[in-house]
Each structure stands twice: as structure tokens, then as C-alpha cells.
């Protein structure tokens, strides 16, 4: 069972997208997201969708992951569609149910918003699917670095995130073990009202917390024993170097965006 | 062994109270004086609460003696400035393999201590690779820790310590949470490092069979050092062990029962093999 617990959404691979520097990937993503909000035509959106799909193919990510990644967006998309369809007026009246009308302007805007959302999620997925959670954390902590000048412990925050990532599977394993132990003692997590169900989780959560605190204690000791000191200078095994290919990738993204904006696709 | 320079860890009349416990009757440790030399394999045994783990933590400067002094390669553990040097010299392996791996991959975990030493990336990568090869972990380098077996996790922990090029490994019941195969895997690794690299080992254990493999056994009880000698002396002293609620090895216990029934066995039997050989030679003589 524990073999199926994956770290975040990352899919191991060795494509060019996997190997790009996480910092530049984050910058590129931000640029693309801003770009998405600047466009206002379906054709531009279509081109962006094409770009996203091409990049997915380049990353060698199976199509099923793409659909799975989009699933959480489904409800938001539906909700947005309904709101736009029924509450935006303008254009031709398409059809009428009682006093509610669906007009062409609403349909068009609704579809546009949803399409934009889908492309936006796809671009974001591209980052999370091809970057390990750890390098993502390192990448983000780089952008937090300026905050260390005003006294925020950014290095320590990055360490906290990395340790949290390390322990997610361990704690999940443990919660499954606890659940089985409680089931063996006659606990019932399935039936009853929502309050009953929530109540039945208490014997699960309390020991989980107790054990998490014990783990934290031991881990802190182990880290100290291996020479970790808060505020001390550390180095990293894998230096976060930006190479020519990283700059080239970013340049391509910028050029594509600039072209799309100047020719007003 | 080879004079002053070969002493790795030295404790001088150490007394230790856990903070807020000064008024209690028993200090966690008192009057502890002993030295561990380079290349020595010391087993630390004693009943629960006898201060074994506390003593181990003193050697790694996780705890500082309340009175007396602990010297690691001649450096006092009480000095804040030399803390990294002390922790680098005496690496520590804990009981729970899960709670001492910090990083999300094996290689990053082996690198953790080296990153704390602020070594250049190149050197860290080389040392991680070298250590992983030495311990046969090179295939696991990219694995996340939660996919490893218990024995593998403990070996990664050992690798993390070993990469820092220590002189001494402190182990706090490293096999207590492992299956028999994992136990053997870990003990074999440590024994090999001890023999081939001259690493000193201080091994806290509850298992007489593990202690029997050491060069020397130190017994603690209620915070006091009450015996210190070769396994042949300490583990065969059943009256002492039994009074502390400890056991000798299976061979020692069995030999004692046989002797009580009038079987003329030699006194220094420690391992199963020795017992079998003695019994067989008795058989042939009679």
C-alpha cells in the first residue's frame, strides 16, 4: 500500500522540462499566467492550449495525468459556466426558461473563462509534474531570500518545508496503520452521521499527533547530532546553477509571449 | 592502546542531572570515568533507565555534563565553538530509523551532515558517492527513505554519519526496531567499518549476543559504571548480570545450567560454537 504514496504530483522523468532549473521554470510559469490574463481572443487561447499540450508531449507525461490534474477544476468550471450562462446579459437571446434567459454574450464569456482556467491549470501542472517537491521548495525559497534582510528566517523555512515533504509519506503510512489498529478494536469509520464520523476520527488523530510530536523531537535531536545549527552557514549538494539551456528556455517563452501580444492573436 | 594520541573519547568523573532534577536523589549519571581508544568496539549495557543513552548523548555534545568533563579527541564538549568538530568526530545513530532521516532522497540525506559542514558541492557529491559505494547503497541514491527497508534505512543513517569521516560511531540500540535480516545487515556493516577503517564504536544494546561481539563491555546501573571488561569476563559473570535483570548469551546461560548439573565445562564459554565444541570434546573424552 505504501508504495502507492507518491510525493506531490511529480512524475519522474528525464526530459528537458525535468532538467530545467526550477527557478526559471517558476519565472516562466508566472510570465505565462500573466500572459493568459492579457489575452482576449479564443484564437490566442487556442494557441496557448496548443503550446501547453506540446510541452506535455515534450515532458513525456501520460495523458491520463493531465486529465487527473484537471479533475479538481471541474466543479469550479461548472460553477463559472452556470453563473455566466444565466447572469450575464447581452447579445442574442439563445433560449429562455421562464424568466431566466441565456444570452450569447454570457455563453461566450463563460466558455472563455473556463478555457482560460483550463490552460492556466495545464501550465501550472506542467511545473508540478516535472519538478520534484524538493526542488520546487528550493526554487521558491530563492524568491523568498530578499525577505531574510528584514529578519525572516528563509533558510529555516525552506528546511521546514523539506522536512515536511520528507515526512508526509511516513505519517500517511502511520495513519493507515493506526486506522487498521482501531478497526481491529471495533472502531467504525464508515457509518453514521457526519458528526459521528468526525467523532470516530478522534481516536485516530490524537495518537497521530502524539507520535508526530515524538518524531519531531527525535528528528530535531538527530539533526543536531549531525551538526545542523540554526543560523549557521550551509551549502547544498546540488547547487542551484542556471545554465545556458535554462536561459534559452526562458528566452523562448518571452519571445513567444511577445510575438503573441504584438500580433494580437 | 598506542598512548595518548589514540584516545578518541574520554569522560572524566562525569556527573549529569537532567535540568530541574537537581534535588532528586539520583543523578542520571555520576562518577563516570573511562576512555575509548581508536578502533575499539565497546558495548554499553545496563537495565532500562541506567543512563546508557544519556552517556551516549554526552559523547556527542547533545548533552553537556553537569560536573566533570567529556573530551572528544581532547576537545571539551562544553565549548560552543568546537561543537561542529565534536559532532563530526563522534557521529550518532539512533534507534528509530524513520526519525533520523531528514531528506527526501537517500543521497540528500547522506549529504545532510556535509551540507552542515558547509563543504563545496563538488566535494559533497564525491563523498556521498564514495560512502554509498562503501556501504552498497549506490542503487538506492535517488530513492525516498519511506521506500527503504528498516535495515536499509539504518545503513543510510550510518552512511550519513560516515560521510563526515568520524573517528567514532555512537549507536543507541540501532537494531531494536529491525527484523533479524536487518539486524545482521547493520551489525555486519558496523563491524566491517570498525575492523577495516579503525572506527571506534560505542554500541548501546539490550542483546547479549550483540554485546558478545564487542571488544569490551561496559555495564551501567543507576547512573554508575559497575563493570568494564572483555566480553569473556563481563558476560560470563552471571550473578552480576542477573542481579541487574540482564542475561548472558544463550551459550553462557546454558553452560551455567549444565555446570550446575555437574557437567565439567570450562568457565570462558561465550558463543554457541564454543559451547558445542566443549560439549563435543567432553563426549570424546568420556
Image (cartoon, coloured by chain):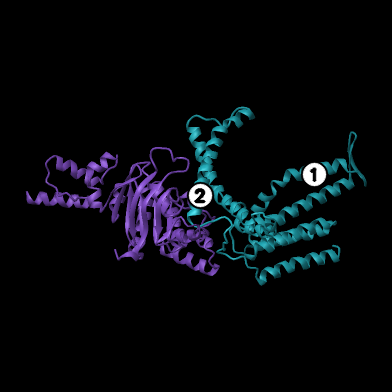
Chain colours: A cyan, B purple
Label 2 – label 1 distance at C-alpha: 46 Å
Q: Secondary structure at mark 2?
A: helix
Q: Chain of mark 2?
A: A
- Whole-percent x, y for residue B28 in the image: 39, 43
The answer to whether dots 2 and 1 both sit on one chain is yes
Residue at 86% in and 49% down: A108
Q: Earlier in the sequence, mark 2 or mark 1?
A: 1
Is B21 displayed left or right of B196 in the figure?
right
Q: Is residue B224 above or below residue B39?
A: above
Q: Which one is closest to the eye, mark 2 or mark 1?
A: 2
Q: Residue at x 57, y 32 (%)?
A: A202
- Taking the view exactly as shown, the residue that stands out farthest to the left is B286
One can see residue B10 in this view? yes
Secondary element at tag 1: helix
Badge 2 density bin: few <14, some 14–19, many ≥20, Cα 10 Å: many
Q: Nearer the viewer, residue B187 or A88?
A: B187
For the question of whether residue A126 can be seen, the reply is no
How crowded is the residue under tag 1: few (<14 C-alpha within 10 Å), some, or many (20+)? some
The quadrant holding residue A148 is bottom right
* Residue that label 2 marks: A219
Which numbered marker is on residue A80? 1
Across and down, in percent, residue B50 comes to: 36, 43
Q: Residue furthest bottom?
A: A244
Q: Nearer the viewer, residue B110 or A144?
A: A144
Give x and y (percent) for residue B62: 46, 52
Amino acid at each position: 500500500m505504501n508504495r502507492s504514496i507518491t510525493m506531490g504530483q511529480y512524475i519522474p522523468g528525464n526530459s528537458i522540462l525535468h532538467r530545467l532549473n526550477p527557478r526559471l521554470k517558476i519565472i516562466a510559469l508566472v510570465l505565462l499566467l500573466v500572459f493568459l490574463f492579457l489575452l482576449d481572443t479564443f484564437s490566442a487561447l487556442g494557441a496557448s492550449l496548443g503550446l501547453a499540450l506540446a510541452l506535455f508531449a515534450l515532458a513525456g507525461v501520460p495523458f491520463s495525468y493531465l486529465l487527473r490534474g484537471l479533475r479538481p477544476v471541474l466543479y469550479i468550471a461548472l460553477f463559472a459556466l452556470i453563473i455566466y450562462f444565466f447572469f450575464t446579459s447581452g447579445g442574442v437571446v439563445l433560449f429562455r426558461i421562464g424568466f431566466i434567459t441565456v444570452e450569447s454574450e454570457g455563453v461566450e464569456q463563460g466558455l472563455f473563462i473556463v478555457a482560460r482556467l483550463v490552460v492556466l491549470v495545464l501550465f501550472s501542472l506542467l511545473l508540478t509534474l516535472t519538478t520534484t517537491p524538493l526542488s520546487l521548495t528550493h526554487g521558491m525559497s530563492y524568491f523568498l531570500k530578499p525577505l531574510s534582510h528584514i529578519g525572516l528566517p528563509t533558510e529555516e523555512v525552506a528546511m521546514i518545508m523539506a522536512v515536511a515533504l520528507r515526512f508526509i509519506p511516513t505519517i500517511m503510512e502511520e495513519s493507515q496503520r493506526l486506522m487498521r489498529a482501531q478497526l481491529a478494536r471495533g472502531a467504525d469509520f464508515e457509518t453514521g452521521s457526519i458528526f459521528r464520523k468526525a467523532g470516530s476520527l478522534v481516536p485516530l488523530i490524537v495518537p497521530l499527533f502524539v507520535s508526530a510530536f515524538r518524531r519531531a523531537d527525535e528528528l530535531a535531536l538527530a539533526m543536531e547530532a549531525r551538526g545542523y545549527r540554526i543560523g549557521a552557514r550551509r551549502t547544498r549538494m546540488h547547487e542551484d546553477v542556471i545554465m545556458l539551456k535554462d536561459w534559452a528556455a526562458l528566452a523562448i517563452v518571452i519571445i513567444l509571449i511577445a510575438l503573441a501580444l504584438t500580433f494580437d492573436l | 592502546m598506542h598512548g595518548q594520541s589514540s584516545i578518541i573519547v574520554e569522560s572524566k568523573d562525569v556527573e549529569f542531572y537532567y535540568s530541574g532534577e537537581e534535588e532528586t536523589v539520583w543523578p542520571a549519571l555520576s562518577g563516570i570515568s573511562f576512555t575509548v581508544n581508536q578502533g575499539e568496539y565497546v558495548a554499553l549495557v545496563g537495565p532500562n533507565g541506567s543512563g546508557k543513552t544519556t552517556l551516549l548523548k554526552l559523547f556527542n555534545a547533545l548533552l553537556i555534563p553537569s560536573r566533570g568533563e567529556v573530551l572528544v579527541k581532547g576537545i571539551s564538549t562544553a565549548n560552543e565553538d568546537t561543537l561542529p568538530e565534536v559532532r563530526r568526530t563522534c557521529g550518532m545513530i539512533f534507534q528509530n530509523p524513520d526519525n533520523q532521516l531528514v531528506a527526501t532522497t537517500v543521497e540528500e540525506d547522506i549529504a545532510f551532515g556535509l551540507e552542515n559542514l558547509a563543504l563545496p558541492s563538488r566535494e559533497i557529491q564525491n563523498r556521498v558517492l564514495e560512502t554509498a559505494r562503501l556501504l552498497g547503497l549506490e542503487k538506492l541514491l535517488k530513492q525516498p527513505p519511506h521506500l527503504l527497508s528498516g535495515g536499509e534505512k539504518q545503513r543510510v543513517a550510518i552512511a550519513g554519519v560516515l560521510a563526515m569521516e568520524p573517528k567514532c560511531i555512537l549507536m543507541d540500540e540501532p537494531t531494536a526496531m529491525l527484523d533479524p535480516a536487518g539486524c545482521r545487515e547493520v551489525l555486519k556493516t558496523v563491524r566491517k567499518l570498525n575492523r577495516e577503517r579503525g572506527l571506534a564504536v560505542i554500541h548501546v544494546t539490550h542483546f547479549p549476543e550483540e554485546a558478545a561481539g564487542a571488544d569490551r563491555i561496559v555495564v551501567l546501573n543507576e547512573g554508575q559504571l559497575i563493570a568494564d571488561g572483555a566480553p569473556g569476563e563481563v558476560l560470563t559473570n552471571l550473578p552480576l548480570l542477573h542481579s541487574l535483570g540482564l542475561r548472558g548469551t544463550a551459550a553462557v546461560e546454558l553452560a551455567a545450567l549444565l555446570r550446575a548439573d555437574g557437567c565439567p565445562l570450562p568457565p570462558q564459554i561465550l558463543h554457541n560454537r564454543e559451547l558445542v565444541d566443549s560439549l563435543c570434546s567432553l563426549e570424546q573424552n568420556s
